Amino acid sequence: MKNKQNIEKVPLIGQTLKEIVHLIQEMGFPKFRGKQIFQWLYQHRINEMNEMANVPNDIRQKLSSSFIIHPLQLNLHTKSDQEPTEKFLFTLQSGEDIESVLMKDGKRNTLCISTQVGCAVDCDFCATAKMGFQKNLTTGEIVDQYIHVQNMSSRPITNIVFMGMGEPFLNYKNVISAADLLNHPEGIQMGARRITISTAGVVPKIKQFAEEKHKYKLAISLNASNEPQRKEIMPITKTHRLNDLMEAADMYYQSSGRFPTFEYVLMEGINDSLRDAHELARLIGRQPCKVNVIPYNEIGGIYRRPSDDKIKSFLSQLKNVPFQVTVRWSRGTDIKAGCGQLAVNSDS
Ligand code: SF4
């Protein structure tokens, strides 16, 4: 379905405080109006210009002539029957579709957002990869996923993970601007430690992220215990070698003092043997980090989820390692909202 919004107009969501102040001053209005508008957009999450109660009508009218609020239009909202998980399908102004997933787990209400339409990284086990790369999302298209979903959720979103469609670090600038907007003290105010950016291993960007000393958490999709195995399932390893990736992860720890999280999607017969568990422990060694094991969510391809017994015996081999190991029994698989399952198609 197409986005029915006026595609001639520029969305306000995605603009920084500085940009809105500049815009409002260019229109001939005082600077403080810019801050008010910023707060209406990001703190109050308005849907209509006329909801800006303390902003004079002439400013609202002038804004309405060239701008709209949202870059995204919600087209489908699906709830899982089995889990407290919801999936949202949005259409961009340019017509492409993207997805976001909301997962409730105890006090946590985590939103997984997309950063690209499709993905070029081509991980063999991933549904998004099958779409190919189409385009980078703008800062506004990334942040608007949060705004729409929070407006529909009865509970506050407590955590945001950049783990939906796309490789966030191949859209680095817009991803960092989006995280900065989500974290902004005059706007959404999502704590930096509640924002996690995930990468398949774009080494120069991990180093840049570390050098720029961003406060957000870093997750790395590792998924293999050695280089040949990783090359098979994640071709990005041919460009960014496993040793370089481990070194970049350590650099992030050294510069931020925060543990990177290694995500390890466990696939039957691929990386789930006891030997893999030992190799994984050796690969990581004493590097300060967390490891999150994610039993694979099947997408109808050649990869399978290991049996629960196999998953447990893999985990038991990691009992005495010097790093923390957690398991994410991924959610929403009945609505294809599990990790690695996001792909826009007719039955999604
Ligand atoms: S797992 Fe992530 S990086 Fe790899 S193809 Fe899928 S969306 Fe892209």
Image: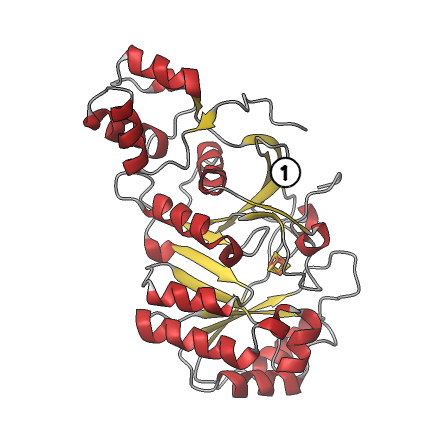
Q: Where is residue 267 in the image (x, y as percent from the top left)?
A: 69, 70
Q: Where is residue 119 in the image (x, y as percent from the top left)?
A: 63, 53
Q: State the colouring used for the structure image.
A: secondary structure
Residue 106 visible, this angle: no
Q: Nearer the viewer, residue 245 or 253?
A: 245
Identify the residue shown where x is 34% and y is 67%. 211
The kind of secondary structure element at disc 1 is strand
State left or right for residue 234 relative to residue 293.
right
Q: Taking the image as four quarters, which one is ligand 1 found in? A: bottom right
Horizontally, is 136 left or right of 155 in the view? right
User: Which quadrant of the rendered structure holds the C terminus?
Assistant: top right
Give the image location of residue 333, x and y in percent. 67, 52
Above-or-below relation of 237 to 217: below
The CB of the residue at mark 1 lies under 8 Å from ligand 1? no
Which residue occupies the foreground of this view, 224 or 246?
246
Q: Where on the picture, by quarter, is residue 74?
A: top right
Q: Nearer the viewer, residue 229 or 149?
A: 229
Q: In this view, does 12 lie above or below 146?
A: above
Viewer-side residue, 33 vs 215: 33
* Figure label count: 1
The answer to which quarter of the image holds residue 329 is: bottom right
The residue at 79%/57% (across/down) is 300
* Residue 82 visible (yes or no): yes
Q: Where is residue 292 in the image (x, y as percent from the top left)?
A: 52, 69
* Residue projecting furthest to the front: 26
Q: Which amino acid does label 1 sit on?
A: Asp
Looking at the rendered image, the quarter that the N terminus falls into is top right
What residue is drawn where x is 28% and y is 17%? 53
Residue named by callout 1? 97
Q: How many C-alpha atoms fall within 10 Å of the one at disc 1: few (<14), some, or many (≥20)?
A: many
